[in-house]
Amino acid sequence: MFSNRRARAGLARTCPAPFPLGGPGHALPCSLFLFRPPSQGRMKETSGDGEAREADDELAEVEEPEEGFSDPEGFEDDISDEELLGDILKDQPQEADGIDSVIVVDNVPQVGPDRLEKLRNVIQKIFSKFGKITNEFYPESDGKTKGYIFLEYSSPACAVDAVKNADGYKLDKQHTFRVNLFTDFDKYMTISDDWEIPPKQPFKDFGNLRYWLEDPDCRDQCSIIYESGDRTAILWNDIKEPVVIEERARWTETYVRWSPKGTYLATFHQRGIALWGGEKFKQIQRFSHQGVQLIDFSPCERYMVSFSPLMDTKDDPQAIIIWDVLTGQKKRGFHCESSAHWPIFKWSHDGKFFARMTQDTLSIYETPSMGLLDKKSLKISGIKMREKQVPVDVVEMKEGIIAFAWEPNGSKFAVLHGETPRISVSFYHVKNNGKIELIKMFDKQQANSIFWSPQGQFVVLAGLRSFLQLVKSHQIKKDYKKYSKIFEQKDRLSQSKASKELVDKRRKMMEEFHKYREKAMQIYAEQKPKRLELRGGVDTDELDSNVDDWEEETVEFFVTEEIIPVGDQE
């Protein structure tokens, strides 16, 4: 038997109210069926009047139920309508004044009646792709439009999408649209005139984030994860044996990743990414991205891109997020159809632009606004990047390549390769099937540059070398001889059998000796006035001091000479 609370919930879901859930003037039919299980011994075969009498008895029982569904006196219902009718109430029409769907477009060209229809068509073409436009208004003054318009969409979501994507749209050289929601004007009008200066944030000194560049042995750093991923260590990549710099337990949950320039070390966690750096690898920044699996950095290390398959919504894309590394703020989110090709974005060398490729579309974005360049993507049919079965041929050069140049009009290219004085030039032709064929090769060419004529009919091989290059080349050779001995000595020291502890001990003793010597020289210099006083003003600190006061004296020694014959005597 159901309890009263459950029975009411069942009736409410079976028989919704005719208004307003069903809409004005639409009464919904409601039928109530009560079932009672048959009593023991009732289910048996009868015939004739027996069946009629049994049916009458059951009907009587239905007409006079033993237990009703009414609430007892004093009963208080603690179940809300949202719990009972949540799936129906969400479709209930909401009361609104309509201005949530209105946008204001500023910097629109001011035109007269003769060009107004053309302007309307342009506006419709640009803004109709964000949703259905139900109403539009072009204010006029003195026979021309005022330069701003009002557009009403079918839903507030379309208006928000239009503001997000059309704000900053460049119509021509003189007109760039500024798009705002109409409801934002009330917010801007209520801004207080009293502005409080925000408190200054304390400066966090993380030390020299690129301290490893000052390593006297020019060693690199590397990271290893061991003990089933429980421990992570950072080491100097020493020529003899790795030297541990920092070691921690449970530093990361999956793996670690270095930034392109080695400034940051990224660790992965279920809640997001953490960046570490400096001599002690302090935490620099944190980025909250639930379930993050992949990351990428811009070449300048200013931005980081993270991917998570867990978080993504239609209105607020969260699968791919671009972060500002310095501030930790989210710059923009993107949807991700597939993460099979990572990284999703290709960055320019300076991080000012990044591009994303989809089917027949190339989208280029600019930083720091993260907006689409010129507010539009490029429609290019037949784009193939990183696709399988794309014909690619490889020309293997066993010698070093000095210069390379394509023919301006055609399918040929030239390559300078080899070493001075045996420099060769080879000419290749790319066939229609993508294969590369060698046409001609010339040996012993004194050249380092290739120049094609504008039409590709002639090619010039030139040997260009500036005075600055000569000076640099001479200086490099001179420095190489100077530093090669030092590097060879260090290499021999590193490859010797002496242990690292012994080398460190010797280095420490040498440093202590230099400190002691500097201290002794300082004391010696401080005692110089006293020595001059004791020696009557004569400075004897140096061997060549007071040369003018020296007296030359010659001493002669008389030496006797005696000859002793050596040999067999008869």
Image (spheres, rainbow, N blue to C red):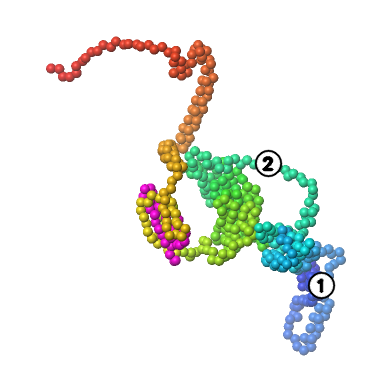
Cβ atoms at labels 1 and 2 below 8 Å apart: no
Residue type at mark 1 is Pro
Residue 16 lies, in percent from the top left, at 79, 72
- Could you say which disc has been placed on residue 24 in the image? 1
Q: Secondary structure at mark 1?
A: loop
Q: Position of residue 547 (x, y in %)?
A: 44, 15
Residue in front for this viewpoint, 476 or 445? 445
- Residue placed at 58% from the left, 44% from the top? 277
Which residue is pictured at 23% across the width and 13% down the height?
562
Q: Main secondary structure of the magenta part?
A: strand
On the image, which quarter does residue 52 sit in? bottom right
> Could you tell me which quadrant the C terminus lies in?
top left
Q: Where 370 sits versus 567, above or below?
A: below
Residue 165 can be seen, yes or no: no
Element marked by disc 2 = loop
**Outermost bottom residue:** 48
Q: Position of residue 409 (x, y in %)?
A: 47, 61
Residue indicated by mark 2:
202
